[in-house]
Amino acid sequence: MNTADNKKVLFVCTGNYYRSRLAELLFNHYADEAGMGWTGDSRGVLERTAQRGLSPSAIRYLEGRELTHLIDESRSPKPLKLDHFEQFSVIVGMCRKEHSSLMLTRFGQIPRMLEKKGVLRYWNVDDLPTPSHLNGGLLQRLKVAFAGNDDHFGQREESGCEHVDFAVRALVRELAGDR
C-alpha cells in the first residue's frame, strides 16, 4: 500500500446509495477527527441506478448519532470506472459475496490482481433486505445471479449501519497506524 503519496480510500457497493456512501461519510468524519490526512470516496459497481441522493437508512443512522452535518442528499450515486483503480491506495468492496462477482464481470481479472497486491479488500456488510414488492426487480435478480442463492437478501437497517460504522472505525485505526 502506497500511503505516502496517495492517502485515499474508495468504498464500493452495488449502487452507491447506502453502504458505500455511508462508509465514505463516516470515514471522512473519523479520519478528519484523527487528523490522518486520508480521504474517502465511494462508487457503485452498477453503471446506472434509478436511486438519487442518499439512502433514508443512512440518513436515519447519521441523524441518530447527531451527525446531520455529514448528510449530503444533493450528491447522487456515481458509477465505478476503470481509472478509479489507479487513484486509490485502498479499495473496499462492501460485501464479498455480492461484489466480488460483479467486479470480476465488469473489470475482468483486475480486481483479483488488486486483491493480491493488497489494494482491494472485501468486507461482509450485507445490503438491506429487499422489500417484498421488489422481489422480481432488477436488483433482486442481480443478487440471485451473482450471489448464487436467494436465501439471504440483507441485514436489518440498524445492524447494517452499525456494521458499516464498526468496519470504518477499524479501518481508520489501521490506517492511522500507517502515518
Image (cartoon, rainbow, N blue to C red):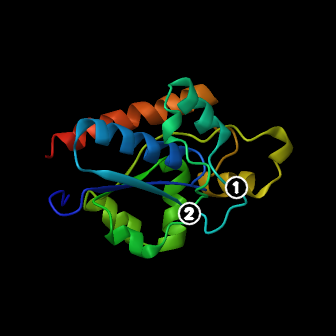
Going from the N terminus, do you reach mark 1 or mark 2 first? 1
- Going by the numbered disc 1, the residue's amino acid type is Gln
Question: Quadrant location of residue 51?
Answer: bottom right
Disc 2 packing (10 Å; few <14; some 14–19; many ≥20): some
Residue located farthest toward the right when viewing the structure as drawn: 133
Residue located farthest toward the front when viewing the structure as drawn: 69
Residue 145 locus on image (x, y percent)? 67, 57
**The N terminus lies in which quarter of the figure?**
bottom left
Residue position marked by numbered label 1 in the rendering: 51
Do we see residue 47 in this rendering? yes
Residue 154 locus on image (x, y percent)? 63, 37
User: How many angstroms separate mark 1 from mark 2 (CA)?
Assistant: 10 Å
Do we see residue 152 in this rendering? no
> Judging from the image, what secondary structure is the residue with disc 2 in?
loop
Contact (Cβ within 8 Å) of mark 1 with mark 2: no
> Judging from the image, what secondary structure is the residue with disc 1 in?
loop
Q: Nearer the viewer, residue 23 or 85?
A: 23
Q: Is residue 22 above or below residue 12?
A: above
Q: Is residue 37 above or below residue 111?
A: above
- Going by the numbered disc 2, the residue's amino acid type is Lys
**Residue 67: image tag:** none
Q: Nearer the viewer, residue 59 or 144?
A: 59
Residue 119 locus on image (x, y percent)? 29, 59
Identify which residue is drawn at 69% across, 37% down.
Answer: 129
Residue 165 locus on image (x, y percent)? 44, 33
Question: Quadrant location of residue 169?
Answer: top left
**Residue 78: image tag:** 2
Identify which residue is drawn at 56% across, 48% down.
Answer: 72
Q: Nearer the viewer, residue 141 or 23?
A: 23
Identify which residue is drawn at 23% across, 62% down.
Answer: 6
Identify which residue is drawn at 40% across, 69% down.
Answer: 84
